[in-house]
Image (cartoon, rainbow, N blue to C red):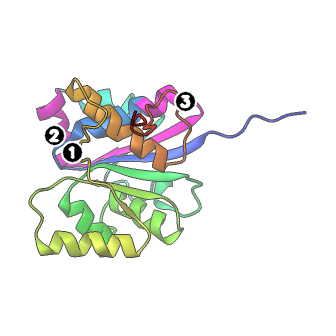
């Protein structure tokens, strides 16, 4: 008798940096992969950006996930290390959220869930969005890296010759999904430059 593998559980947090499209697109891609159960939480500033940048409501974004939690619900399942989870992505990640993670300030569900990921030695990816960076930002990124988190600024690449903004977003999100260890059979891959004649 064979048993189906349990779905991977991924937390997606949308904080108040510009780039809300990354969180939304990540939820869409994870949903389309199948066998992935998504848990989402959105900060107040994150909601403002979703409205400003994408004309999306909280309900529209939460509908893309399997489970949604209010950011102030610090007693939610994802606030505990006993919650079996395969990874968390903060997409996008504000400098405030970065600082909260770097200094262990579990003052809301988003920061607490990230803290849990670090203490349980699970995959935490922060899609930090700011430029230019000051010394506090850089030190906070170093601190999170030293604790085992991954700093992943959504810097577009051009070697795959994107034709649209959606192409650039999709390429970045695909890289994040790779870091989560999830299979993407259709993801574009670099196969090297053609051999010289």
The CA distance from mark 3 to mark 1 is 31 Å
Q: Earlier in the sequence, mark 3 or mark 1?
A: 1
Within-10-Å neighbours for mark 3: few <14, some 14–19, many 20+: few
Q: Is residue 33 magenta?
A: yes
Q: Residue at x 46, y 31 (%)?
A: 187
Residue 55 visible, this angle: yes
The N terminus, quarter of image: top right
Comparing 51 with 53, the one in front is 53
Within-10-Å neighbours for mark 1: few <14, some 14–19, many 20+: many
Main SS of residues in magenta: helix
Comparing 87 with 159, the one in front is 159
Is 3 located above or below residue 152 in the figure? above
Q: Residue at x 59, y 43 (%)?
A: 8
Residue 49: which disc? 2
Q: Earlier in the sequence, mark 3 or mark 2?
A: 2
Comparing 25 with 120, the one in front is 25
- Residue 12 coordinates in the image, percent (x, y): 39, 45
- Residue 129 coordinates in the image, percent (x, y): 19, 52
CB atoms of marks 2 and 1 within 8 Å: yes
Task: Name the front one of labels 3 and 2.
Answer: 3
Residue 46: which disc? 1
SS category of the residue bearing label 1: helix
Q: Which residue is mark 3?
A: 185
The CA distance from mark 2 to mark 1 is 5 Å
Within-10-Å neighbours for mark 2: few <14, some 14–19, many 20+: many
Q: Is residue 156 left or right of residue 145?
A: left
């Amino acid at each position: 008798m064979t048993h189906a593998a349990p779905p991977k559980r991924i937390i997606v947090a949308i904080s108040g940096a510009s780039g809300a499209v990354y969180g939304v697109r990540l939820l869409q891609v994870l949903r389309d992969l199948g066998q992935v159960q998504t848990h989402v939480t959105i900060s107040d500033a994150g909601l403002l950006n979703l409205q400003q940048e994408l004309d999306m409501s909280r309900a529209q974004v939460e509908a893309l996930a399997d489970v949604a939690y209010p950011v102030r619900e610090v007693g939610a399942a994802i606030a505990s290390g006993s919650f079996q989870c395969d990874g968390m992505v903060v997409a996008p990640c504000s400098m405030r959220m970065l600082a909260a993670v770097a200094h262990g300030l579990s003052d809301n569900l988003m920061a607490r869930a990230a803290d849990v990921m670090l203490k349980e030695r699970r995959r935490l990816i922060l899609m930090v969005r700011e430029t230019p960076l000051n010394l506090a930002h850089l030190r906070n990124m170093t601190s999170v890296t030293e604790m085992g988190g991954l700093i992943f600024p959504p810097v577009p690449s051009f070697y795959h010759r994107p034709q649209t903004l959606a192409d650039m977003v999709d390429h970045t999100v695909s890289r994040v999904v790779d870091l989560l260890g999830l299979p993407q059979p259709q993801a574009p891959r670099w196969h090297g430059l053609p051999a010289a004649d």
